[in-house]
């Protein structure tokens, strides 16, 4: 049986870190926090895992960096977008959805909640309350023992973050992994999972561009855990062919 | 508190029965079974319930019969389509989705599994196996006590139906109500429910156009039960405004 | 079809409000807040609903007030316990479980999370964090449009309550209705539902005995909504016989 | 990060195969099919996996072979019982439940559906229909891509088995993996998963003692996959201590 996280025949789990890479070019504060771009900040800690093979892709590359070839060679895709959801081409969204249903994992980060791909897979508005006001955020683990929480204590804290508040308009999560507390009085289901087709999806809330969230060790650990958790399950050849045929 | 099935201020639960109404015009066999159209066969037993106010709408009417006004006055929509999913305009699909998320119930029937509206709300391909070969279908109740099963025995039978077989590519149902057995050796999750936004969705399998399925008393009972189950829950005014604002 | 909340043949929905009735006799502060007992404070607002027929039962009555006859005549049972979970006889717990599986609704309140009946139905420890420190509690609605939230705004507040914090060791809720925020930094899934057999279960967090929580209008509204939501669904006679036979 | 299936510090995944071992001693037909006992037939294919360390335990050993020490050294327990559920001591059931909630995986086989440990973890009767009549059973995969289905086609067949039919009185499964078709007209959710505490549970239907089911390659594959799937997730030390403290 192929080991989890390494599909049959593959040597390593192939991860593509996708990000808009816009704020970093226009906003000095963001550029200072993430001088090489947010995608590089997300990719760097993943590259320390010898079981992963990590590349990045960004909005302004041809086909947003998500060609048929790149997606065919991607086992897990992570997605961060904020200011330019509308610029992502419908054709590329359909291509990503097809790969998720075939089994590619998808980690959706922060304002990616409002991306076309997440809304397409959920079927809902994915709306929520928000406020930028230096709230403290406390992440409580609601699923101890789950692989996405490996290595964590019973909670972890970010000193300053944008607030996201309920009601978060998503289908009932299959697993609620984290719930966040904010100074201003709000709560949020900040770590949730779903399966769609043969693919697994993990939504993880934090990561506003004006905070150094992706330099935080706990956040990095959760993303690493999430990438491993979303890895395609082995499945059989016949089953994969089945998905390919109904997705043709 | 407003009674279930009758939103605050409304006198009756307002149901719109939607159907393609194409096969009946082209196929003599279908026309013989459903001389007034399948939508009329579905609407007739619902009209016997004094708590319901029932209208019909079909594909070839302007805006497919689903104008803003009609949808605003619809508490539960039932959907049957087969041969012309592609002709349903994306604009109307978006309009129906918006109403479901606001709280309108949706009962999806038979080949409606492949309609744009169902695939949009599920986020998956909704693909399945199928065969037209006079299979017998036995519906087993897997959720006794559920209102959708009210008045039924522990199973019911259709002597001849089209077969639908697993794998059915849907998100894990929130409730599995019926599972079907077919003569040829297949099984199918033939009654399933989900919530999306404030709306409830019930998928119910039977109803191939060349069989008199919608004249069957048990099928009629399940559709009646399903319409009542999908009725909008009362909710508060503030909550409804919330959905309207995030859906604007 | 029988109306929801009124099983076939019954004139009204029959509710039994169960409480330990111990703190009120020993603690002057509790007696001052609830001079007729917590059960009476819970039952009084329910009695204003003409669709309900409400009785109470307490720990020190014979058979804890939950004789075979009382339970046979109960459609929904509400449960509050705290100091004396261990005194509830296993025989009575088994009797209540049997009725829930047959279709009786169960509303579990506050420290009832640690009652034998709730732990029996969940299969887990139902453990949690807690602190008595005058925290403010904000209840956020995570399921707008759900009947348990009818009449509420998008949140409601209790000025002082005992804190309950995650991790709450329960099976993944089928529906998460409320999540609470506490001044001290904790969060809690404070409104959750599950089905077991033909019965529906609603857990609702607030109600420490030293606070006037059950005099709060929003809390009263949620309990009223919860009682209606937990009402037995009509079901068919054959289905009810089925449960009686496997439960014999 | 610890590899899945190998908790931190452990060299191999430690599996205990538990079985009643009664039919084999009394029924010549069973003894002929399983000369070394059903537990040995189940354990033998698992022993071929170099990542597993496999032992067996049976009802008539002291403490049913499930001492504190054995359970402390068990990562995944498989359970087959039929004729003697009532002889399993409540004290041992509580011990097994405690270990599951701490994270030990549990694979429940065939008539183990009616074991004390399964009913305790589910909170329901776990009742079902059954018939011994040489039915053919076809297992349809309803979750392609799931690790429990790795290596399988879209279905597999057992020529003769005991029939189990719906309604199966279990809490709504978190994942429905297989649904079975039987010659006589019944269906059954024959592969289901749940989480309880930090532990994962997989129920897998086939295995009546008078058929050579546990010699079937597909059945062996599913049990092997299920054992790996149920393996404790890594989790953090603090989280494990949390479970130990609330379970003390």
Image: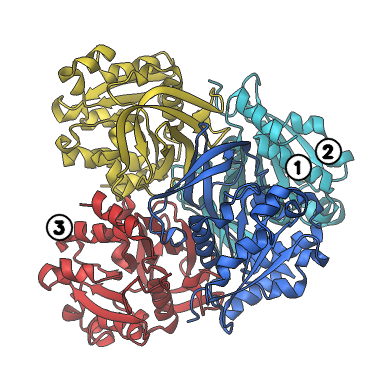
Chain colours: A cyan, B blue, C red, D yellow
Picture disc at residue B216: none
Q: Which residue is mark 1?
A: A18
**Residue, x 20% and y 56% (percent of image)?**
C94
Q: Which residue is mark 3?
A: C91
Q: Which residue is mark 2?
A: A65
- Residue D152: x percent and y percent? 53, 24
Whole-number angstrom distance, CA of label 1 to CA of label 2 = 8 Å
Whole-number angstrom distance, CA of label 3 to CA of label 2 = 65 Å
- Dot 2: element: helix
- Residue D66: x percent and y percent? 22, 30
Which callout, 1 or 3, points to the residue nearer the camera?
Answer: 3
Chain identifier of the residue bearing label 2 in the image: A
Q: Are marks 1 and 2 in contact (CB under 8 Å)?
A: yes
Within-10-Å neighbours for mark 2: few <14, some 14–19, many 20+: some
Above or below B56: residue D74: above
Q: Nearer the viewer, residue B206 or A208?
A: B206
- Dot 3: element: helix
Above or below A64: residue B196: below
- Residue C161: x percent and y percent? 38, 74
Asked whether residue A162 appears in the rendered view, the answer is no
Chain identifier of the residue bearing label 1 in the image: A
Chain identifier of the residue bearing label 3 in the image: C
Quadrant in the rendering for residue B227: bottom right
Q: Determine if marks 1 and 3 fall on one subunit.
A: no
């Amino acid at each position: 049986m192929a080991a989890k996280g390494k599909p049959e025949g593959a040597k390593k789990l192939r991860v593509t870190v996708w990000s808009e890479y816009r704020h970093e070019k226009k906003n000095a504060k963001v550029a200072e926090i993430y001088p090489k771009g947010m995608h590089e900040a997300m990719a760097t800690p993943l590259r320390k895992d010898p079981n992963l093979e990590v590349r990045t892709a960004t909005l302004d590359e041809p086909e947003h960096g998500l060609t048929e070839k790149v997606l065919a060679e991607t086992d897990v895709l992570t997605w961060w977008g904020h200011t330019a959801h509308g610029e992502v081409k419908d054709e590329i969204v359909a291509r990503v959805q097809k790969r998720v249903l075939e089994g590619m994992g998808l980690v959706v980060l922060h304002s990616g909640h409002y991306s076309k791909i997440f809304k397409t897979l959920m079927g809902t508005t994915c709306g929520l309350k928000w406020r930028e006001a230096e709230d403290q955020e406390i992440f409580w683990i609601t699923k101890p023992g789950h692989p996405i929480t490996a290595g964590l204590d019973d909670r972890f804290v970010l000193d300053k973050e944008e607030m996201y508040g309920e009601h978060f308009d998503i289908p009932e999560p299959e697993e609620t992994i984290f719930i966040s507390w904010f100074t201003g009085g709000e709560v949020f289901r900040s770590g949730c999972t779903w399966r769609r087709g043969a693919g697994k999806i993990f939504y993880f809330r934090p990561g506003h561009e004006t905070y150094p969230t992706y330099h935080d060790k706990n956040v990095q650990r959760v993303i690493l855990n999430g990438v491993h958790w979303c890895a395609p399950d082995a499945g059989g050849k016949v089953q994969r062919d089945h998905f390919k045929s109904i997705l043709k």
